[in-house]
Amino acid sequence: MDVQEMLEMMRDPLGAPFFPVVFQVLLVVTWVLHIHFVTGAIGSSTFSIFAFLHKDPSLLRLGRITARLTPNMVGLGIVTGIAPLLFVQTIYDPLWYASNTLAGFWSVTFIFVVMGGYSLAYLFYLKGSKDGRLLWSAVASLVLLCFAGWVMHVLHTVSIRPDQWMNWYAPGGVIDTRGIQFHAYDVPRLMFLLPLQAGLSFAATLMFVAWYLRQRTDADLAFLDWTASLGRRIGLIVAPLYGVFGLLWAFTEGPEFGLTAFIAAVAVGLSAGLFAFFWLQGKRPVLAGAKALGVWALALLVVAVTREVIRSVSLSRFNYSVATYPYIIDWGSVLMFGVTSVVGVSVVTYLIMVIYQSGQSADGTVSAKAEGFGRVATAMLGAWFGFFVLVGLFSSLFLR
């Protein structure tokens, strides 16, 4: 059996429930949200530790804010990570399950690592960020979150090399079921996608937060101007490093898939573009906060597309393509997905409205329209939850 036959046999025999290319597009788009929150959490956690170690008044003030931001970012990273994971499992199921088998110990441990990282980040914010106690919990949280990133990096890197799976599963003809080996990794790629993107995510977030809070009537304008300027300086420092490690990624992993020039062009283009953007905000960076977040989202979209191109090219060697993935349109599944998406987006939209409007007023009030929309969104969520409970009861009692 060759690799192509193996991949075809490992596909879901029922196929995808809708056009596979649609899932591929959704995978790219939802990964952008996920990676922003994940890297933002790592960036804010790193800054909090730095601030509490240096004890400068301005750094400490911002460090307390970022200590609160970290668990929120981690939570959002977990929630938004569900969508791209489900899309990967739908159209890349042979890759995902094979890589999780080859690194089974770490894929299971990953869940507890993330739980520990989130819990410790929340512990530091809740019990230590006010007076700087329990700094060890922030450090431990950062270590666990970075390790979780390493595990996901290894799983992805293993997944796009199906020609090596049998060698890793049975080295020398002896089956290894322990799942403890890190079979494939690329450090420049990891540096590009995790710590350096964390710096850029954090820089864009600082500028956005400063712009957002500046609209309050009781805003400390001097502190917010300083915060935005700090975000700009971080962006100016990290953007060139982003390009350097992008080039290293191109020259380490690129030759294997014939994509050296492509990855290098993307890395240099993103680095130059981001550096130019931060440079041009020199006069009033606090006014460019919304723009900074938009530019960064666009940059992450380019990275997401690049990742998908690499995965597609790596699998094309074995005639595996999402475009040819078998599918049978299941309108019931499509309807469930569509309604769930509408309900979820409505609830998230309401939360965004509350956060935005309450942040604009000193007493935290929101408009009557927002409250009305919230009641509708909450009712939709309750009805949808009740529907799922009824479906579960009906299936358990009558569909045996």
Image: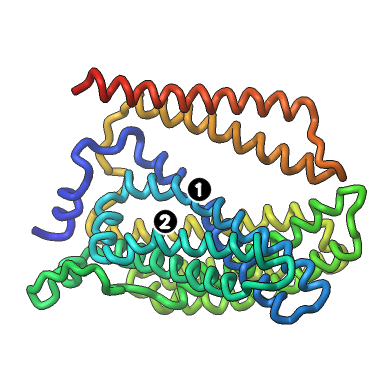
Q: Residues within 10 Å of mark 1 (few under 14, many from 20)?
A: few
Q: Considering only vertical position in the picture, is 20 above or below 179?
A: above
What residue is drawn where x is 26% and y is 55%?
97
Which of the image's four quarters has the C terminus?
top left
Q: What's the mark number on residue 308?
A: 2
Q: Give coordinates of residue 287: x percent, y percent.
A: 84, 56
Residue 330 visible to an observer of this rendering: yes
Which of the image's four quarters has the N terminus?
bottom left
Q: Considering only vertical position in the picture, is 86 above or below 316?
A: above
Q: Give coordinates of residue 44: x percent, y percent.
A: 64, 66
- The amino acid marked with disc number 1 is Val
Q: What's the mark number on residue 79?
A: 1
Q: Give coordinates of residue 321: x percent, y percent.
A: 29, 50
Using the numbered discs, state the Cα–Cα distance from disc 2 to disc 1 in whole angstroms: 21 Å
Q: Give coordinates of residue 171: x percent, y percent.
A: 14, 75
Q: Quadrant of residue 208?
A: bottom right
Q: Considering only vertical position in the picture, is 310 above or below 146?
A: above
- The amino acid marked with disc number 2 is Glu
